[in-house]
Amino acid sequence: MTTTTLPATDEVVTHARVQDVALPGGAGTFALITLDNGFDHTKPNSFGPQGLAELAGVLDELHRRAEAGEIVGVGITGKPFIFAVGADLTGVPAIATREQALEIARLGHETFQKISDLPVPTFAFVNGASMGGGVEIALYADHRTISSGVPAYATPECFLGLVPGWGGTYLLPHLIGVENALTLIVANPLANNKMINGKQAFELGVADELIEPVTFLEDSIAFAAKVIRGEESPARTAVDTSAQAWDGAVEAARQQVLAKTGGSAPAPLRALDLVQAARTASREEAFEAENEALADLLMTDELRSGLYAFDLVQKRAKRPAGAPDKSLARPVTKVGIVGAGLMASQMALLFARRLEVPVVLTDLDQDRVDKGVQYVHDEVDKLLAKGRVNPDKANRLKGLVTGSVDKAAFGDADFVIEAVFEEMGVKQKVFAEVEQVVSPECVLATNTSSLSITEMAEGLQHPERVVGFHFFNPVAVMPLLEIIRGDATDDATLATAFATGKGLKKTSILVKNSPSFVVNRLLGRFMGEAGRVADEGTPFEVVEKAFAGVTPMPPFMLISLVGPAIALHNSETLHGAFPDRFYVSPNLAKVVEAKIPSFYGSDGALDPAVLDLFEPAAEPVELTEEQVRTRALEALADETRRMLDEGVVADPRDIDLAMITGAGFPFWNGGVTPLLDRTGIAERVTGQRFLERGAASVPQA
């Protein structure tokens, strides 16, 4: 088919380069296609219209050569470290009509189908990262090998607002079984886009051979030669296609999707429909159903929001708005951490792993210091057991982290961060003590989640070297780092903080000194509104269900995760700053006073002890789920606008980036502001949209 109706884009073409290989044992000539876009591994192979057209032409020529007896087999592999990561989505915003979307969907199927149509055995040698269309193209081959060194294997389409629409919803379940396929297609994408490695992919059944990276291509070609000579016929596990097993697995997945998304994300539900139909559909019927699904989804708000979010974490996260010139940053050769509790110990491990510099923990007594250091050692042992570090690296990491009860151990540190009790007087005292033993250039960072950086620096000899450096829990997992500039913080300190954040591989955003900064301020307003609704008489269950698909977890589950005492402290801090907007729940205070650690019991149900503590409103007002959700979103819209007007961050995109990477807000909503825009809440509450029209919305046909 022609692609003349498709919009012109700045596609980075992934070329299909062919070379003839003489198979060992005299098996004949083998044509090896290497996918290569001409860049190093920092710009992975992807499939756009031009690249697909080139690949189709190559496959047509190989079909001719195969029929002429010139080749006995065809293989596809990728450039070093990369197999392929799917469709080139950079051109999606230019798609103006459903017809164009349908054309792109069919182009992928028609091109990949040419692999299956070749009259000789076909092979996919998955040598590196493989995602989306990269997973799918390999499914069209007769046989697959995969490297044990593959770092990421996934079908992330549902995470972005699409489905695996170039064969994935049909070919995967028929190859590896419906349950395994649904893990890749739906469960992993909705678990914050979870990736698996090559070994795990092999265990799911996606490949015939698992091969070590050092000799991967050589051994893959040897495997192909054995198959072509008839010396090897890989056995595959039979797939259960009974209605009971297949439909049961799909229905179980559907219930999990609805619980997680509240039905607000169309892509995973559409994927489930496609997988369910794949049990009895012909290949042609299934592929055309995928085409129609892609054509529909490519025109949705959710996809535009997903791509907007993807762009934030891939591009804006790497160029933090407002960060000073990186040449001003001072080197960090040793790190000190005040405190040796869980958060401090997590930070110690992160600094040691990422910066590979000495890290020293201090605390009030030797027992606490020893526990902190032991935590790091235990975590390193876990990494060793999982094969994520070798014995030499494990010993080196353990040697980097030490402890002391004397802050004099910070004497030669370049960066000291405190992680002590969230009380201003305590933190000021800590910094005053640290300042007596460190150099004037040593950065003093605070992991405070809500307190004023400016106030914390008051009274110090060098307030200009104090900066907020707010991690999110768990430290190793959550990408966000809020870097907060106090009134006195100078550019050298700020540049050092950003350079350190980059070294830690965190997504750093610059935040103005303000109560609770970005994420905790917005969550404080959101959870405060949820608490107010519950206190007024709406049942807990209704409040919890109201936010499926909006927040990563229900509000009271989120309070339980961070801890009721911390949530109460944050709400009290914000109420002190903005008493007219931030609500402090007296019932939450009772839970904290009773020292109940969670709203939920070990059985996953709401704890009756919590329910017993809650005093009902004198005149209860019960809201519906929709009313609860609208009220909370209206509060978020109001607070977001106020934060932007105050200059807490430079741009709405920083709000969204923070909520995605620091609070786990879904990609399909684009974080916060695209959702508020497209629901009309932004304009109704604040009189204006947050983003320009089209920034994260669907084009008009």
Image: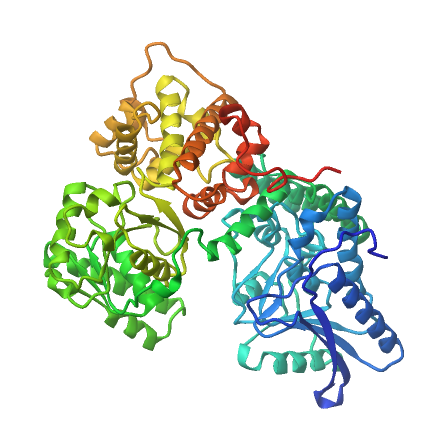
Measuring from the top left, give residue 508's x and y in whole percent. Answer: 40, 53
Residue 149 in view (yes/no): yes
Q: Is residue 91 left or right of residue 422?
A: right
Q: Is residue 638 left or right of residue 561?
A: right
Name of the residue lying farthest toward the top: 619
Q: Is residue 465 left or right of residue 134?
A: left
Looking at this view, is 261 or 530 the one in front?
530
In percent of the image, x 55 and y 35: which residue is there? 675
Looking at this view, is 491 or 271 the one in front?
491
In the picture, residue 385 is in which quadrant?
bottom left
Looking at this view, is 538 or 272 the one in front?
538
Q: In the picture shown, does residue 667 fall above or below 235?
A: above
* Color scheme of the displayed model: rainbow
Q: In the picture shown, does residue 634 fall above or below 311?
A: above
Q: Quadrant of the C terminus?
A: top right
Q: In the picture shown, does residue 397 fall above or below 561?
A: below
In percent of the image, x 40 and y 25: which residue is there? 540
In the picture, residue 333 is in which quadrant?
bottom left
Looking at this view, is 193 or 529 the one in front?
529
Measuring from the top left, give residue 425's x and y in whole percent. Answer: 14, 42
Name of the residue lying farthest toward the bottom: 26
Residue 268 in view (yes/no): no
Measuring from the top left, give residue 431's x and y in whole percent. Answer: 16, 52
